[in-house]
Structure formats: structure tokens, C-alpha cells
Image (cartoon, helix red, strand yellow):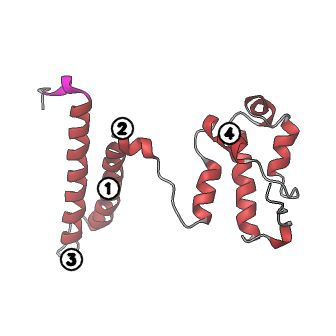
Amino acid sequence: MSGRVARPPECRVLGADDYAALKNATRLAFKDAGGPEQFFEETRAGSAETLRNYFKHEQAAFAPIDVIADAERHARRPFVTEALARIAGFRLMPVAAAVTGRGVMFDALREACEFGAQASEALRDGKVDRTEAPEFLKALREAQRAFAAAEAQLLADHPFLKGEAE
């Protein structure tokens, strides 16, 4: 031990909203991991009441990082890690999606949605006018590129699809 004592709550660096966001994220992580009553058996917390205390706003203590890691492993998403990233000015992105190709599929879906929104706006009057045409074409080409990448990824992942009827 270095002999240093933890700072009391009134000396903390972050604002109250940031600490509240961490408490809320902890509550969501524990809930998504099965709830304190079930999740406490998966971690070293000892009891469901201990876990509940970690997300109570009136309690100064926060969940230890290993308990958060256990919760996020069982939860559908990393609630606390996302909150920490936001507080630090970052956005958390799933690495596995980009590595496995799900990012390519997601990009295609996102581009299709963006193009659909832009097309419905441009076609509100039934046609694409001269001022809308350049942006419309750009959005269409971005969607086409995304779909081509998705098709290439799908064919790479499933070679038996090559030669399928067009």
C-alpha cells in the first residue's frame, strides 16, 4: 500500500452527473446480468444486497472493477464501460463486429436506411429535382458500395453461394 487514502466524495474530480451515470450504468449491468439476486452468485460480491448498494446513489462506494467485468461478461452490452467511455469523451465500438464481418453487414443496413430516409425526403414531391440530385446520387452510390462490400463478405464467409442464381 502506498499509504494514500481515497478521496472523500466531495473531493472527486468528476461532476455529480458523471457519478450518477456510473451508478445507473452499474444498475443496468447488474439487471441485465440476471439481477442482483441471481448475479451475486457469479461474482465475489457476497450478497445481492452488496450489489444493490453499489448502484444506490446515496452510497459513496462504487462496484469494484472485477465485479463490473463479471457483470458485463453476463450482460448483453458493457453498460459501465460505455458510460466510462462517454465520460472520457469517447464512443465504444464493438471490435468483434468489425473482425467477423458483422460490421460490413451493419454498414450496408445503415447505408440503406440513410438512403431510404434521404430518398423519401427527396421524393416527397414525386421526383428528384436538380438541387437534390447530387446528394441523392451520392447517397445511392454509398449504399451501393456498402451492399457490394456486404455481398463480398457474405460470399467469402459462405463460398457455396458463388454461382447462385442472380
Foreground label between 1 and 2: 2
Q: Residue at x 22, y 33 (%)?
A: 156
Report the mark closest to the observer, 4 or 3: 4
User: Start and end of the magenta stretch?
Assistant: 158-162
Relative to residue 138, is residue 110 drawn left or right?
Answer: right
Label at residue 100: 2
Q: Residues within 10 Å of mark 3 (few under 14, many from 20)?
A: few
- Relative image position of residue 31 (x, y in whole percent): 72, 40
Residue 80 shows up from this direction: yes
Asked if residue 50 lies in the magenta stretch, the reply is no
Upstream in sequence: badge 2 or badge 3: 2
Give the labeled residue for mark 1.
116
In 3D space, how far apart are the residues under numbered discs 4 and 2 (Cα atoms)?
24 Å
Report crowding for label 2: few under 14, some 14 to 19, many 20 or more residues within 10 A (C-alpha): few
Say which quadrant the N terminus sits in. Answer: bottom right
Q: Which mark is residue 124?
A: none
Using the rendered view, name the quadrant where residue 49 is placed: top right
- The first of marks 1 and 2 along the sequence is 2
Which residue: 82% across, 72% down?
A: 11
Label 1, label 3: how far apart the Cα atoms are = 18 Å
Q: Earlier in the sequence, mark 4 or mark 3?
A: 4
Locate residue 5 relative to residue 146 in the image: left or right.
right
Q: Please, what is the three-letter code of the amino acid marked with disc 2?
A: Thr
Instruction: Tell us which disc is closer to us: 2 or 3.
Output: 2
Which residue position holds label 3? Answer: 131
Q: Residues within 10 Å of mark 4 (few under 14, many from 20)?
A: many
Q: Is residue 127 visible?
A: no
Q: Is residue 62 left or right of residue 103?
A: right
The amino acid sitting under disc 1 is Gly
Q: Which residue corresponds to mark 4?
A: 71
Question: Amino acid type of disc 4?
Answer: Ala
